[in-house]
Image (cartoon, rainbow, N blue to C red):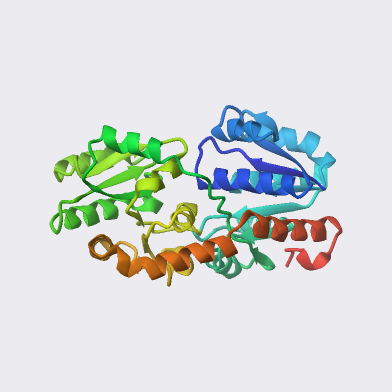
Amino acid sequence: MYLLIVNTEKSWRGGERQTLHNAVGFMQQGALVELLCRQGSPLVDQALATGIKVHEVGGNVETFWWLARNASRYDLIQAQTAKSQTAAVITKPFHGRPVVYTRRVNFVPRGWLTKLKYKKTDCVVAISYSVKRVLEAFGIRNVHVIYDVVVPRLLSKQRAEKVYSRLGLASKKIVATIAALDQDKDPFTMLQAIKKLSLLRSDFVFLHFGDGPLRLELQRRIDELGLHDRYILMGFVTDVEDMFALMDLFCISSREEGLCSSVLDAFAYHVPVVSTKAGGLLELVEGRGFLCDTGDSDGIALGIDQILENPSAFNILTDAAYRYVVSQHSLQATTKQYLDLFRLLIDGVDKYDNHA
């Protein structure tokens, strides 16, 4: 099986990490895998470091040209982003290969052109049942749920200690999130929750790992609330998973979420979770962490306070989360589901056709 995976994002976020996990998993099962990526992106460096062959393109137009001229030599194309899906579908008359799109976002698609794009996609994979329901409501049939992957690794506690000691946090409980600074992640609700929590206790600090367009506005609000030593913007940090080694709690305040790979990481590293019920988070965290409504800063503050006050009371949930992620989100299980689907598509099994 000769596969082309397309992800032309410039950033390194959960979707790019999952792209790499997919590629590695396919290779481990004997598939030939190549990536089409944005030139100079972090995904290029990460893929090359694992021995994956990478083709680099400079932008959307170059992506279209590359696929039109080269994609016919592969058995199947997996598009990992909406832009990649568009490019793979539009160039399909030139390459004639099955296109699988892995959708990780939970917002409602719109427009007849978008619907046409989906119907020309041979198969759509949703990373949660929440994403599947959104697509089915839009009129897309034969959406398959394949969960994202967690690949736990040995964490560098020493590296985490260096980061935390540099901030003078030796005596503080560490509450953290890993989330882009954008509207979907709703950092302003998180900030309000931390403000309310600071009125209840002073033995913690909140670290926000991630960057994005709201950084300057969020920092201004932090300063206005006098929380500059309580809510710390850490920016983009490489190998951020190491920070789980010393986290007391992981929190996510998203308004829109397909699933959230950082919550999966928290589960895998035995870190308790406070989360909103946005999108796939509800099915992921229910029975495995503390849930509250989107936009509910009071609920987030309450959840954090209860866990910090009595962490052992939440051990049952944390243990259940670990068992769940090991059994349902392993690289082996996810890879097998994808490759079984790919084989059916390559063999031309029409029951996996998305056409209405």
Q: Position of residue 80 (x, y in %)?
A: 62, 48
Say above or below: 284 vs 2: below
Q: Residue at x 71, y 45 (%)?
A: 88
Q: Residue at x 46, y 68 (%)?
A: 320
Q: Residue furthest right?
A: 347
Q: Which quadrant is the C terminus positioned in?
A: bottom right
Q: Is residue 262 left or right of residue 18?
A: left
Front position in the image: 266 or 161: 161
Q: Position of residue 240 (x, y in %)?
A: 43, 41
Front position in the image: 210 or 37: 210
Quadrant location of residue 138?
A: bottom right
Say above or below: 313 vs 48: below
Residue 191 at least partly seen: yes
Q: Position of residue 191 (x, y in %)?
A: 25, 51
Quadrant location of residue 334?
A: bottom right
Residue 292 at least partly seen: no
Q: Residue at x 69, y 43 (%)?
A: 5
Q: Position of residue 265 (x, y in %)?
A: 47, 53
Q: Is residue 297 left or right of residue 183?
A: left
Front position in the image: 180 or 262: 262
The mark total stands at: 0
Front position in the image: 342 or 52: 52
